[in-house]
Amino acid sequence: MAEAEELAAADVGGGGCDGLEKKPVMLVGIDDSEHSYHALQWTLQHFFGPGLPQQYHLVVLTAKPPASSVIGIAGVGTADLLPTVEGDLKRTSVRVIDKAKQLCTEVIDVSYEVCEGDARNVICEAVDRHHAEMLVVGCHGYGAWKRAVLGSVSDYCSHHAHCTVMIVKKPKHQKAEHTP
């Protein structure tokens, strides 16, 4: 099913299927965080802004973790939770892609993908599959301790993606503005 979602999503927007020479690919990995949306907005402003030539095919990708990985250790009643968790994860993925589509209205050559799996692996595999020249990811700004415990998608991608990796950090003054 994930493959079908991926293939259907890949057909949205332009994709170089018109016989013309293909543009290089810029892949932006996002999740449902303001840091990811900031990275996408930064990318749009600096590479796809009004008056700028759109030299890349933009691929916006979000990873949907398998429901079983979210639930974790199995126990009594776990099987009953799987459909509920799966539904929540699908709704989150749809929300992420819908927000990306709202942000990318000015981009001429864009496609959107939802792939199931761990974000680190999904993003690096997508870089290889699309032969991306550049990967853009956001940065949550975790300290060393949180990165060690939670892991860092941006750190992993910077070491394992086979392309240039741009990690977009949200400026501190913007962080403070959104803090209640």
Image (tube, rainbow, N blue to C red):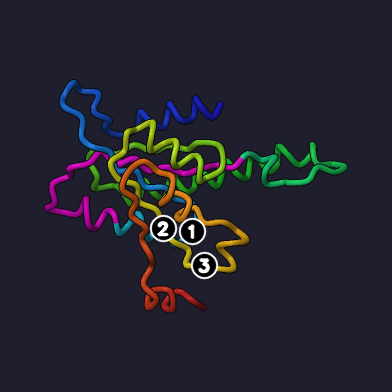
Q: Is residue 7 left or right of residue 18?
A: right
Q: Is residue 63 left or right of residue 48?
A: right
Magenta highlight range: 43-65
Q: Nearer the viewer, mark 3 or mark 2?
A: 3
Tell me the distance, in whole angstroms, between the alpha carbons under discs 1 and 2. 9 Å
Residue highlighted by disc 3: 142
- Label 2 environment density (alpha carbons within 10 Å; few <14, some 14–19, many ≥20): many
Q: Return the disc, 1 or 2, that comes first in the chain's sequence.
A: 1
Relative vertical location of residue 19 with respect to residue 2 in this rendering, above or below = above
Residue found at the very far front of the displayed protein? 159
Q: At 18% from the left edge and 21% from the top edge, which residue is drawn?
A: 19
* Residue 40 sits in quarter: bottom left
Residue found at the very far right of the displayed protein? 76
Q: Amino acid at mark 1?
A: Ser
Residues tagged 1 and 3 counted as in contact (Cβ below 8 A): no
* Residue 90 sits in quarter: top right
Residue highlighted by disc 1: 33
Q: Amino acid at mark 2?
A: Gly
Q: At 37% from the left edge and 43% from the top edge, which residue is drawn?
A: 60
As for residue 154 lying within the magenta part, the answer is no
Instruction: Report x, y in % for residue 144.
Output: 54, 68
Instruction: Report x, y in % for residue 145.
Output: 59, 68
Residue highlighted by disc 2: 138
Q: Assign a secondary structure to mark 3.
A: loop
Q: At 50% from the left edge and 46% from the top edge, which residue is drawn?
A: 120
Tell me the distance, in whole angstroms, between the alpha carbons under discs 1 and 3. 13 Å
* Residue 75 sits in quarter: top right
Instruction: Report x, y in % for residue 6.
Output: 46, 30
